[in-house]
Image (tube, rainbow, N blue to C red):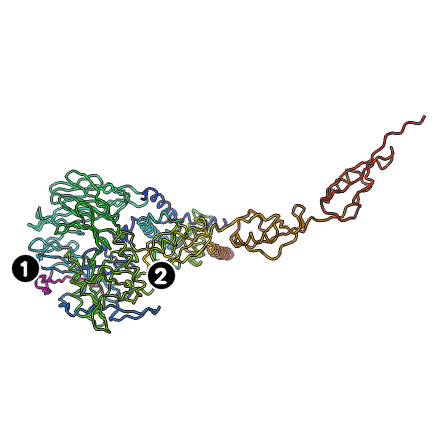
Amino acid sequence: MTDGRAIAMLLEETERRLRRALPAAVGVEATPDAIAEALAWAWEHRDRVETLGNPHGYLYRVAVNAGRRVPRTPDLPPVDTASIPEVEPGLVPALAELSAMQRQCVWLVHACDWTYAETAEALEISASAVGTHLTRGMTRLRTAIIGDEDHG
Amino acid sequence: MADLEQQLRGYADQVESTVGPTPAVAASRNRRRRAWLGWAAALVVVAGVGVGIGFALDDDDGEAPDTRVEPPTTSTTTAAPDDGVPTTTVPFATPEAAFDAGPLSPRHDALVLRTPDEVIVWGGDVESFNIGRPDLESEQFADGAVYGLDTSGTWRTMAPSPLPAIDVQPLGVWLGSDALIVRGTDAARYDPAADEWTSIEPAPTRVWDLIDAPEIDAVFAVGREQVLRFDVGTNAWSDTGRFAPWELTEQNIIPVDPNPDPSVSWTGRELVAVAGDLLGRFPVQTWTPGGAWEARGHIESGRSQVALESTSVDGEVWVVGYDMTVHVFDPATGDVRALPHLPVLFQEGTPTIDHLDDGRIVVRRWPGVAVWTGDGWEVEPMRRAQSGTIAPGVDGQPAVWQFSVGFDAGDGNRFGVTALPRAGTLHEVLIGALALDLGTDIELVGQRLVVEDPDAGVRTPIETTIRTADGATCALAYGLVDREGWRTILFDSERELAYDCPTSVITPLVDRMRDFWADGAEPVTVPSVIGLAEEEARSALASLGYVVDVVAEPNAQTAGMVVRQDPVPGTTLALDEPVTIYVSSGSERVVVPDLEGLTLVEAAELLEELGFAIEGDPILEASVEVPEDRIVRSEPQADSLVAIGARIVLYQSAGAPTVPVPTVIGLFYDTAEATLRNVGLVPVIEFRAVPFGDPQVGLVIDQTPPNFEEVEVGTEVVVVVGEAGSEPEPLE
């Protein structure tokens, strides 16, 4: 028998984490619906969800699948340089240039502080593959941003 | 500029703040089915939805789910898929059952309304998308025909209707001598005896359900925020007032919908509306003629259920949700009682509950029907057709018909049979669909559903089975029965292809289905074995007839525990498709053992056992503590955490190092001591008397071993220091 509150807390946590995690995969606009789909799924399958070792990673996958596809370039807002001057505006186009897998690895690990294991579950790849995508992604990001600075 | 990781975090903060609020679950789709929209949405496409009957899904907003299906195949033989599985479509050869094709063009979502001796079929539409023909124009119909039951299959076309041809499924209620038919807000009455339509005022709001209330000569029309009353005598609409505020459990995850789409029933004295609730407290409201909607407390079910169905039975209201527990609400007293739990859960999805004309109370959800016996539930397999779809003809063929039986199953678990253009069969399907609506067992039709055996030229029970090319959506159609026994049909609901399927595959599946009905066991989906030990998982899956593949992978969970499985639990799978279980091989990072003092062979064995590899030859290293040839240390060193399979460099003791003994003779003894210690030797001081005043007093006068001799570090070196003898007696 499921304790409704336990699953409620889990879903609350999921919702919070997915709000930050999903935009890099499905874009800002599609994120709320994707979360709703994942939560609906989780709610229906809550007995099963509670047995998952890594529910957030799994539900990330559900959410991305609910969106049917990972867009080539998700819609991400331009850097708000007024409120976060420390962020290089070239970061967003540079993120868009990454492969979907690299972008998600970079985003989940560095922007969302997910562990390799969580990221691996979310992307259905191995933890070492996360490391590989991450390294390549970060290298490309650095190159792109430094290049921007050189030109600027 | 901040470092890249900080920039990503900062930007993620910004992005997160721009994400819109999470909508009420599935608000974008079907409100009624929002809690299980996943497979419901799939079914709407796959089955094309029935002729507005049975479990036909109410796709409230008419929005087609974003899934594509292949166009219907146009002939009775279908192409073999790429995997070369022989393909056999099941043509239904029914010469004696060749019905009049009737006047109506193929359609679905039509009103199918029974009168005492006829069936009115009106309206409906063809959504090109739903029939897999996006190339066709979608079309809505406002025509209809009446089928005479007592004249055994004659049709007459209905007079032109005043109701619009719009993409809304029509609703109808038989009023005794004519029918009230509502489509959206438009309404009319149809008298089949005179074949006359009478236009009436449109309803003030869109109508989602009609409830007959003959006791007060009224029909209630359920809208989203209120219930309308249609007066049969005057054709006038009036409002019963707004619902009272729904006392739903506040949920900070999923916003509470103030208009929760209640299930409404008429008891003969009052309307009872019950709404689903995310924490299982279903608020109840009642309305009596002349009064207002009044909150009447809650049904405490303890199970979250959004979609409820209800029916009235002898003045009470029976409510069921997907957990298959029926609660009975007595509007006279406000009391609630729970009936014994249904013996099986059947599949997922909201069941329907109906109080049939013959007095039986039935709860239906694929694959079973539970009938109330007065003190418990009697379960029987569902033998009724759930839906039929009649799709437009293709390439000059008269029509494609698709007929789904018991398709109300879980995602990927779509059950049914699809048949292809065949003149004369169109009506058989329609009749099958009608049979459902009339509560007639599909067996009537099922016994005509036979396989044409091209070799023998005879009709035989269906033993050809149908399965998908990849086997993943292979499903059992278990509703079609003939007099000899069960028929089993598998079909590919995605591609609508039929396949030959080995008996070895189908037999255990059938057995399992029988067991399911016999024991009330779980339905045929892959169970979750996550968290079980490998052996438990194996036997659990094997007992269900699955082939099990085991893959070991590093994981933080205890070694030997199943950490994930493919396909995921709940998937329906053909029995020859393996279930892969991933068993933890233990933590991904392991501790390097302490190898000091072991022989090379011992160390190598230990490392191998733990999954390490040895990198190159051992490196010789002098060691004072570790005897020669034994292992001194490793790189990475003992107790460090490294990945399984890492390569370990071993350092083997070359024994203690040697040094040449320095020359200390002639040094002051403390200098000599320090000099020896500096090179790792151990000074041992001895004294030897020398004459008083001898210049050697306090100096080293001898050493053993002698200088320049090579000795092991740590060797004792005896140094002899001159010590003054006693002072000589003064001379006389």
Position of residue B438 in the picture relative to residue B548 (left or right): left
Q: Residue at x 76, y 39 (%)?
A: B684
Above-or-below relation of B278 to B150: above
Viewer-closest of B556 and B629: B629
10 Å crowding of disc 1: few (<14), some (14-19), many (20+): few
Q: Is residue B39 magenta?
A: no
Position of residue B401 in the picture relative to residue B178 (left or right): right
Q: CA distance from mark 2 to mark 1?
A: 57 Å
Which residue does the numbered mark 1 point to in the structure image? Answer: B193
Question: Label 1's element?
Answer: loop
Position of residue B603 in the picture relative to residue B572 (left or right): right
Q: Are marks 2 and 1 on the same chain?
A: yes
Task: Name the residue furthest left.
Answer: B194
Position of residue B454 in the picture relative to residue B676 (left or right): left
From where the camera sits, is residue A22 visible? no
Which residue does the numbered mark 2 point to in the structure image? Answer: B577
Q: Residue at x 25, y 70 (%)?
A: B74
Callout 2, which amino acid?
A: Glu
What residue span does the magenta drawing correspond to?
B137-161
